[in-house]
Image (cartoon, helix red, strand yellow):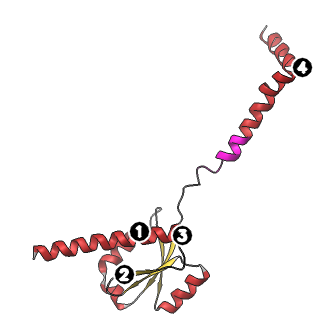
Amino acid sequence: MFWNIYSKRILFSLRSKDTLIWTWIFPIMLATLFFATLSTLDTAGRLHEIPLGIIDNEAYRQDTSLQSMLEMVSGENDNRLFELMFFPNTSMADALLETGDIDGYILVQKNPLLVVADDGLNQTIVRSVLEYYMHINNAIDAALKDWQ
């Protein structure tokens, strides 16, 4: 009985143009459009490692708090934020910055200085992390001076 009713319904839907469109063509088109728009949704918001240069000078080697912070955000885990590259001088870092191999580099003098070639998402992330580090570091230094 079921197969008899089912076959009659299929034949009826093939004969009527309105029913053919709404029962066969529209769901297939809708499914295709959903697949095309939502297929890359799981990878759309992922961040990739940001290539960041560090000028390895004496001031950087003495700033252990900056070293430990950069170690934590670029460590050997799956959620690495930065891919660090160390340079002995600024000329090598400038050359890689111009070619786009790195998004910026940090030069430590008295305070860390971020050098970037243009503005973008990666440069904004690096700037935010560095500003947060400097804010926390200044707050700790002020608290230590008040305590002593």
Q: Is residue 101 above or below residue 128?
A: below
Q: Closer to the observer: label 3 or label 4?
A: 3
Disc 1/disc 2 C-alpha distance (Å): 13 Å
Mark 1 or mark 2: whose residue is earlier in sequence: 2
Residue at x-position 28% and y-position 69%: 136
Q: Amino acid at mark 2?
A: Pro
Q: Which residue is mark 2?
A: 112
Q: For the residue labelled by badge 2, is the local secondary structure a helix, a strand or a loop?
A: strand
Residue 29 placement (x, y as % from top left)? 76, 37
Quadrant of the frame with the N terminus: top right
Residue at x-position 72% and y-position 36%: 30
Q: For the residue labelled by badge 3, is the local secondary structure a helix, a strand or a loop?
A: loop
Q: Which residue is mark 1?
A: 128
Disc 3/disc 1 C-alpha distance (Å): 12 Å
Q: Amino acid at mark 4?
A: Arg
Is there a contact, CB below 8 Å, between mark 1 and mark 2?
no
In the rendering, which numbered label is found on residue 15? 4
Q: Residue furthest right?
A: 15
| Chief SS of the magenta region | helix
Is there a contact, CB below 8 Å, between mark 3 and mark 1?
no
Q: Which residue is mark 3?
A: 120
Neighbour tally class for label 3: few under 14, some 14-19, many 20 plus, Cα within 10 Å: few
Neighbour tally class for label 2: few under 14, some 14-19, many 20 plus, Cα within 10 Å: some
